[in-house]
Every structure is written in structure tokens, then in C-alpha cells.
Image (cartoon, rainbow, N blue to C red):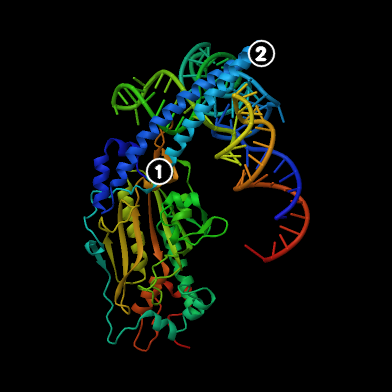
Amino acid sequence: MLDRDLIRKQPDVVRAGINRKGLDSSIVDRFLEVDSAWRAAIQAVETANAESKRSSKRVGELMAQGKKEEAEAAKVEIRAQKENLAVSEAAERELEAQLREIELEVPNLPHESVPDGKTEDENVVVRVVGDVPGFDFEPKAHWDLAESLALLDLPRGAKIAGSGFPVYTGFGARLQRALFNFMIDHQTLVNGYHEVYPPYLTNRASLIGTGQLPKFEDDLYKTQDDIFLIPTAEVPITNLYRDEILDAADLPLRIAGYSACFRREAGAAGKDTRGLQRLHQFDKVEMVKFCTAETSYDELESLTQNAEDILRLLGLHYRVIEICTGDIGAKGSKQYDVEVWSPGVGKWLEVSSCSNFEAYQARRAMIRYRPEAGAKPEFVHILNGSGIAMPRTFAAILETYQQADGSVVVPEVLRGLVGTDVLRAA
RNA sequence: GGAGUGGUGUCCGAGUGGUCGAAGGAGCGCGACUGGAAAUCGCGUAUCCGGUGUUGAACCGGAUCGAGGGUUCGAAUCCCUCCUACUCCGCCA
């Protein structure tokens, strides 16, 4: 959601930003049209309402003075006023609902530093880090390694739940558990995030707050109680402070949490579905920051570094991509993706997406802070990033640390938690 | 899941249809008293939306007593639905 005043006063700026993202800016004109109608309507309602309130007060006075007949006459008059009021109220409500609907769909504007581009092909590689893993044999894909080492049971996952619901078994389950312990410990104990463990289902208001709704309902798993399985812990964590005014002294707030994530992604089947590349259920540590406008771009840089830490410490080869305007999506102002190199699959796999939403989510979720006592509350800037997504990291570990005999060396930082140095076939 | 009780301003707490944005208290701010402080006394202390206007002074209008709907000329107060907290019972991990 953008500042209404910005759209009213500088519609060209808004249009230009939306156009840079390659999205349809005609929504600005729809907004302006409905907005001016709504403002006229609310004026009419408030004037009529003030009038009938005054009249009602008079009834009270007349009754108190015992002038019953005059009071009755006034009542009749008020009834007529009320009928008119009801009509203009209905019109106003309808316009307000329309305005809200449009407002929720107006995309966020890209930050000026975001590179222009139409598709992901124009994303910019910011840095490539770590050694390219070299092999004197043909590296295998993680699905083959996981099968021979009995780390995953994908067929049984498909049987009990469906395709895209992996079962981790034995040392696979243990490696998974080691990974998320390592990640959450690093982000909280080393990088100073406050740890939370969130609910896995949230209500509509929360999903509107972070921007998944109303647009992407088809991508979510929904329950009969109108609450939804979370697609990311971004939703519960960001909404922790929905409708709240934060203390300026507490900013920036940095929060991290581990959760399972559920993505229906209707229509996404068919591409990159092999192994652990694209799943309906996966695990992830998520980092969320609430800060002021002054620091949010610095916070984005450190957020990305925090995500990178995990890959660096695991000794994996990765790169950081700056997402171009055409690929950034509706919500973000600026976004970096972190991709790990998967030598067996021969691809870069996205394991983190770090975004600054500026005040876009804060406006939707009404999350503000008071710059100083007595001052008007301002919207915070909100950022989030994965720190990091588990399955693709799991895949990259197997593929990067595989040996000619099919065994996999456990990265040093995980050995204590996994309980072995090398994963071998039984 | 069943039965019951509650949800009021920063906090505590009164208020069962009429001038209530809401008594009283605490806290906080300003002032008086004091050498200074405490105590005491006086005054002031919500948020949001729209408009005029300024550029973030002021003024006008509106909304807000968990949320939404209803009854009524008029609702914090009556009715309905929902959310939520607590107590008891049942069930479960």
C-alpha cells in the first residue's frame, strides 16, 4: 500500500514507478477516480450526520423540558433526514470498499537504485563467493545421492501426502534438524536476532498485512476455518506487531524464527520439480526487521550478509543477485536473492530472498512507531529475508561434499549436531 | 466440545438508553507554595479520518468504550453474530 497523498499529489511519480516494474499503471487512474468520488461522498455523509445529531440532541432537550409534542414533531423530521443519510452512507461505504480494493493492489514502487530490466535475465550479479567445487568424477544430483544414502524417501512422501512433500529419513532427518538448529542459532546468538517460534496458520488479516492476500489466495493452503497455512514465517512474524505503535527506542527490531512453510503454487508443477528443488512443504529460518526509513537500506545490506553467513560457514559456493525492476514483484522496493551453486544439478538455486518493502507492508498492517513522545506515529520500514531455506541448502551440501565413492562429507559446522563426519550407504 | 463470567482512555476503575470522549484515581506535563525537595493545591493531559489551511500552527466536521451488524429521534448502556481472556466440566499430547 502506498501513501494516498502521494498518489493524489504525484500520480506521475507513482505511474513511472509502476511502469519501471513493467506493471500496468492504469490502476493509478482508477484510484484517483474512486478517491475523489469517495471524498465527496464522505463530505456529504458527515454533513448530513452532523445535522441529524444536532436534531437528536434537541429531542433530548425538549423531552427534558416536558415539551412532548414538539419532541414528537422533531422525531418525524429526523426520520426523513435519516432516510437521506442512509442513502448517502451506502454510497460512501461502497466507494470506500472499492478504494480499499484498488489500494491493496497498487504495487510498491522500486527504489531508485534498482537496476532496470524486463525479466530475470537482466538481474545483476553483485558478487560470487566461495570456491567453485571441483570434482575428478561426474558429480551426482542430490536426489541420487539421497536415495543411495537413504536420506530421503520421496515416494513414500508422495504416498502419504502427495508429490512435493518429502520425507527425510535417518541421517537425512538428522542433517535437516542439524541445519535448522545451526541456522537459528547463528541468526539469534551471533547476529543478534530475537528468536520467535510462530504459529503455522494465520488469518486473513495477517495475510493481507504482508501482501499475500487478496492477490495470491490460490497459492495458499486454506482450512475450513478461514485460516491459512503459512507460505513463510514472514507472515506471522511481521504481523506480530500489526495494529501496533512501536517504541522508537526499540528500533530496529530484528526477529528470526524457524518454521515449516506451505506453498500450493497452483500451476507451478512441471518445472524444476525433481528432488528438493520445488516443494509444497519445506523448512526455513526467516528474518524480519522493523526499522526507520533512515536505516532501512543499510539494514537490507546487513540482512543479506546475515543470509550469506550461513552459506559461507557451510563452505558452499554462492552468489548474490540484485533483482531488476521487471523481476522484483509487486511488494518490494529492492531485493537481493542469494543463490547456492548446486554442482550435481548444475544450477544456481535460490535459498534466500532479501527485500526492503519500505512502508508498503507497514501501511497494510498498520505498524508504526512514534519518533518522539507526543509526535505523530510514522510507518516503519519492514524488511525480510530467508536465513535460509533448508531443502536447497540440503541439496547443495550433498552435491558439494560428495565423494567419488558416493559418500558425503558433513560440513564441519554441522558435525556435532549430525553426529558423524561422513554420510555413507549402510 | 459444554456451562459460566468478563473485555471501557497510558494504567486502574465507575457508568444499564438522553447533551458521555466518557466520573474518580494513578501516572505524566505545566504552574503555585519551598532555600531545594517531598507533601499539598490549581490547570492540562487519547487516537484516527475528512475538509479549510499551514507545511506539518490552527480551525471546522466525523468516527472510536473488543470487532461487526441491528433496535431507537438518540446506544458504552438493549438485541444478534464473531473475536478474545478467565473459571469449571469433558476430551486430548
Q: Chain of mark 1?
A: A
Question: Which residue has dot 2 on it?
Answer: A68
Q: Can residue A189 be seen here?
A: no
Quarter of the image where one finds residue A348: bottom left
Q: Are marks 1 and 2 in contact (CB under 8 Å)?
A: no
Residue nearest the viewer, comparing A366 with A408:
A366
- Please provide percent x and percent y for residue A308: 33, 63
The kind of residue tagged 1 is Arg
Question: Which residue has dot 1 on it?
Answer: A363
User: In the displayed structure, would residue B33 be above or below residue A162?
Assistant: above
- Please provide percent x and percent y for residue A30: 33, 42
Look at the numbered disc 1 and give the secondary structure of its residue.
Answer: helix
Residue nearest the viewer, comparing A211 with A23:
A23
Residue nearest the viewer, comparing A97 with A179:
A97
Q: Are marks 1 and 2 on the same chain?
A: yes
Residue B47 relative to residue A136: left or right: right
